[in-house]
Image (cartoon, rainbow, N blue to C red):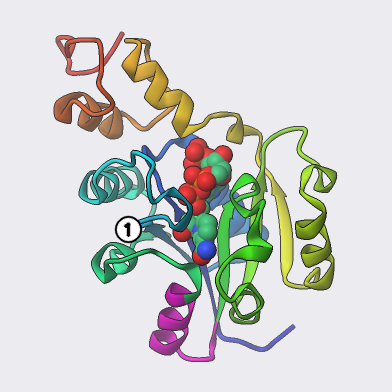
Amino acid sequence: MTGKSKRLGIMGGTFDPIHYGHLVTAEGARYTFGLDQVLFLPSGRPPHKRDAQVSDAEHRYMMTVLATLTNPYFEVSRLEIDRGGISYTIDTLRALREQLGPETELFFITGADAIFDIASWKDSDECLALAHFVAATRPGFSLEDLPESTRQWVARHQERFHMLQVPAMAISSTEIRQRVREGCSIRYLVPEPVEHYIRRQRLYNQALPPSRSGAAN
Ligand code: NAP
């Protein structure tokens, strides 16, 4: 026990779009690690996706707000979106540490796939000094699936690095974007307000015209 007075989860991701896998992960981390609050942090410009097609940050922010509205423990931060430039996690953790002071214990939560190359992240050792890392895994994922360099890095930081099994992580944003493009239903994969937002804003080159309710069948 560290004697810190507050535990804050920081849910980092591109959220393009946010889905139930993310929400189940955040809620699972909240009760597993006794977090007082989970702050969802949509990336401004993800460091490893400079050339990739990522939806406008304002759309990703709005969908994250819509998805988290009904959980009193969830909040959404514009920190990385408003900072501009490339969203390095170390800059975010330093800013939050400065803002919140040493009394708040930080838990950075993200997908296990996202931390594949964490050893090469900017100032990755300092990231772990500032926050615990929680890696949400899809069913069947094992530490052995990580590259050797990452496994060594995890072994050095095992007291601050945690794996969290989340069955709902079988859902993926990539699959949802593809389903929208192909005109397939995304109902029950994302919260209803997010589904409506995607339809209304015509995100992801959707093939289907909006149905009577504005949602897909
Ligand atoms: P990504 O490469 O798009 O995602 C990799 C995998 O992790 C995907 O399967 C993704 O599923 C999953 N994932 C992503 N965020 C998740 C979350 N919060 N909970 C559960 N699963 C999640 O990863 P990303 O979203 O761009 O990056 C994740 C976080 O790591 C962001 O905060 C990003 O800024 C940070 N990051 C920092 C650095 C750095 O500082 N150098 C480098 C890379 C990433 P979905 O596609 O379904 O979300």
Residue 29 in picture, x, y percent from top left: 60, 56
Q: Which residue is mark 1?
A: 44
What residue appears at the point 37 percent right and 13 percent down from the top-left corner? 185
Residue at the front extreme, as displayed: 51
- The quarter of the picture where the C terminus appears is top left
Front one among 34 and 181: 181
Judged left or right of residue 164, residue 87 is left
Residue stretch in magenta? 91-104
In the image, residue 195 sits, relative to residue 65, either above or below, namely above
Estimate the x, y position of residue 186 in percent, counting from the top left.
Answer: 38, 20
Amino acid bearing label 1 = Gly
| Mark 1 neighbour class, 10 Å CA radius: few under 14, some 14 to 19, many 20 or more | many
- Disc 1 is placed on an element classified as loop
Above or below, 26 against 24 in this view is below
Q: Residue at the location (39% across, 60% down)?
A: 41
Please say whether residue 112 is visible from this viewpoint: yes
Q: Is residue 147 left or right of residue 176?
A: right
Chief SS of the magenta region? helix
In the image, the residue with mark 1 has its CB under 8 Å from the nearest atom of ligand 1 = no
Q: Determine the residue positioned at 25% across, 11% down.
A: 207
Residue 32 falls in image quadrant: bottom right
Q: Split into 4 quadrants, where in the image is the N terminus?
A: bottom right
Magenta span includes 84: no
Placement of 112 over or under 155, stated as above or below: above
Task: Estimate the x, y position of residue 70 in percent, counting from the top left.
Answer: 33, 47
97 displayed left or right of 52: right
